[in-house]
Image (spheres, grey):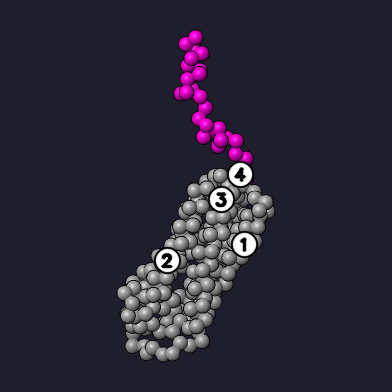
Amino acid sequence: MRDLADQLSPANQPDPSKRVQSNLPASPSIPRGLLLWLTFGLVGAVLFTIVYLIEGAIRPGYDAWRHAISALSLGPGGWIQQANFIVYGVCTLCMAFAWRKVLKGSVYAIIYPIIRGIEGLALIMVGFFSQDPAPGYPPGSVLTTPTFHEQIHIIGAYVIAGAMACGFFAIAWRFARDPRWRGWVTYSLISGLLVLVFMAFFGAGQNPQNVFAGYAGLFERLATNIEPVWEIVLLARLWAGTGLMRSNT
């Protein structure tokens, strides 16, 4: 009787959450080749950050707190940051191609890669079209009426930010259809909202009279680094073997 009681006790009963987990269909792991493509795209993002941090630290007269990353495209050595944008854009396009394969079989295989592709093309565009001189940089420069290059650059910059935010929202919707990735819905939505908030502060800081002007560069860096951090954590999980369930919607 005692043995029977032990078998029937709650401590010896299967954990309901584990039963639910075991009933989930297996998620196919991501092929190694696609993981390498995604990692290559991430390397571009990390390299982009490293380059502009080093350039910002050694450029005379450049203030990373208030000057935009794009201002590094100006003055002597500006070609380095221009190339940095272009390389980052190419790597992002490669990542978009990989996501097309990873999400194959669902509408997200079209939507998300297109958004990332737009981001990559916009990065390349801002690499070719530099901004005009900023207040205080390059040293001794004179502010003028916005040029054609400046207007194209601004459009490209906000397309990049918009694509980052929309990408987070789109992939969050995809994660919502996979029980193993439900926690990433909230993470992705918050990430997308933060990109928009920080870019709004950055935009406000473009006015020298605005209270955010002294920290415009900081807000831009916060906005643009949300995506690489998200990708690092995501790829760590994918490399660990967590796959994505196939979705027909």
**What residue type is disc 2 on?**
Val
Contact between marks 1 and 2 (CB within 8 A): the answer is no
Kindly check if marks 2 and 3 are in contact, taking CB atoms under 8 A apart as contact: no
Q: Earlier in the sequence, mark 2 or mark 3?
A: 3
**Which residue is drawn at the image coordinates 49% and 48% (left, top)?**
183
- Give the distance between the C-alpha atoms of the residues marked 1 and 2, in whole angstroms: 23 Å
- Tell which circle, 2 or 4, labels the residue nearer the N-terminal end: 4
Point 49% across, 69% down: residue: 161
- Of the numbered discs 1 and 4, the one sitting upstream in the chain is 4
Q: CA distance from mark 2 to mark 3?
A: 23 Å
Category of crowding for the residue at label 2, using alpha-carbon neighbours closer than 10 angstroms: few (below 14), some (14–19), many (at least 20): some
Instruction: Judge depth for marks 3 and 1 and give the one in front.
Output: 3
Of residue 235 and residue 11, the one placed in the foreground of this image is 11
Seen at 37% across and 75% down, the residue is 205
Q: Nearer the viewer, mark 1 or mark 2?
A: 2
| Spot occupied by residue 210 in the image (x, y as percentages of width and height) | 33, 77
**Please, what is the three-letter code of the amino acid marked with disc 4?**
Ser
What residue is disc 3 on? 176
- The type of residue carrying mark 1 is Ile
Give the Cα distance between marks 2 and 4: 34 Å
Question: Helix, strand or loop at disc 2?
Answer: helix
Closer to the chain start, of discs 3 and 1, is 1
Residue 72 can be seen in this image? no
Q: Alpha-carbon distance for marks 1 and 4?
A: 21 Å
Which residue is denoted by mark 4 in the rendering? 27
Q: Secondary structure at mark 4?
A: loop
Q: Which residues are magenta?
A: 1-29
Give me the C-alpha separation between circle 4 and circle 3. Answer: 14 Å
Is residue 11 covered in magenta?
Answer: yes
- The answer for how far apart the CA atoms under marks 3 and 1 are is 15 Å
The answer to whether residue 179 is seen in the rendering is yes
